[in-house]
Image (spheres, rainbow, N blue to C red):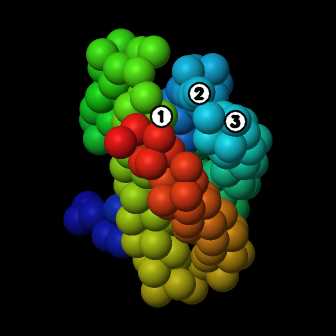
């Protein structure tokens, strides 16, 4: 049987479910490594939000009556690996926070892309409840990205220079 947009949505949900769980594991390490209080607090806040994102995804799996499965996401694994390299190579330097923040924004941009796409698909498929949950998460991811940009511009990049 040919695959359709419902199948694509489900596969992408499994991908972002895996990604969110990986991010949930990585954020405490980022918070611990961050030198600037503002950045550390942003990572801690986003960890709490990410736990909520995982719960929303589980609600979506229930709504579409599919198992909440994870599909390994090579993109997020690569971004997390780069973050580990930054932590190792720049530990104790003024540039560490700038590197951590850049990696965090790469994660946010990936999530924004995925949630935006899934939102459009859910709307197209008439999955209003799914679309509402995805829109809520998308809004939070965009707000986190804006906060990280603000921290970069007002604090971290200047300290790294």
Residue that mark 3 sits on: 37
Viewer can see residue 76: no
Q: Residue at x 43, y 29 (%)?
A: 94
Instruction: Give coordinates of residue 26: x percent, y percent.
Output: 54, 26
Q: Nearer the viewer, residue 103 or 96?
A: 96
Q: Quadrant of residue 10?
A: bottom left
Residue depicted at 39% across the width and 65% down the height = 113
Mark earlier in primary sequence (1, 3): 3
Q: How many marks?
A: 3
- 102, 10: nearer the viewer: 102
Q: Measuring from the top left, give residue 70's x and y in whole percent.
A: 48, 35
Describe the element under mark 3 as helix, strand or loop: helix
Residue 136 in view: yes
User: At which x and y percent is residue 67?
Assistant: 58, 42
Q: In the rendered view of the protein, which quadrant contains the C terminus?
A: top left
Label 1 to label 3: alpha-carbon separation: 10 Å
> Which element is circle 1 on?
helix
Residue 35's label in the rendered image is 2
Mark 1 and 2 residues: CB-CB less than 8 Å, in contact?
yes
Q: Is residue 74 above or below residue 157?
A: above
Q: Is residue 38 left or right of residue 155?
A: right
Give the alpha-carbon distance from disc 1 to disc 2, as whole Å. 6 Å
Which residue, given by chain and number where applicable, does mark 1 sit on? 97
Q: Which picture quadrant has residue 27?
A: top right
- Along the line of sight, which residue is nearer the eye, 96 or 16? 96
């Amino acid at each position: 049987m040919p695959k359709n947009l419902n199948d694509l949505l489900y596969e992408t949900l499994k991908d972002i479910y895996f990604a969110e769980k990986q991010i949930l594991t990585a954020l405490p390490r980022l918070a611990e490594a961050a030198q600037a209080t503002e950045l550390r607090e942003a990572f801690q806040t986003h960890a709490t939000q990410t736990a909520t994102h995982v719960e929303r995804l589980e609600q979506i799996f229930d709504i579409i009556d599919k198992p909440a499965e994870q599909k390994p996401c090579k993109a997020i694994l690569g971004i997390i690996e780069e973050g580990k390299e930054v932590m190792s190579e720049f530990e104790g330097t003024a540039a560490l926070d700038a590197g951590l923040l850049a990696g965090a924004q790469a994660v946010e941009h990936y999530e924004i892309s995925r949630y935006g796409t899934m939102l459009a698909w859910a709307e197209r498929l008439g999955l209003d409840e799914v679309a509402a949950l995805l829109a809520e998460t998308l809004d939070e991811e965009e707000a986190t990205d804006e906060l990280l940009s603000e921290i970069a511009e007002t604090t971290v990049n200047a300290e790294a220079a």
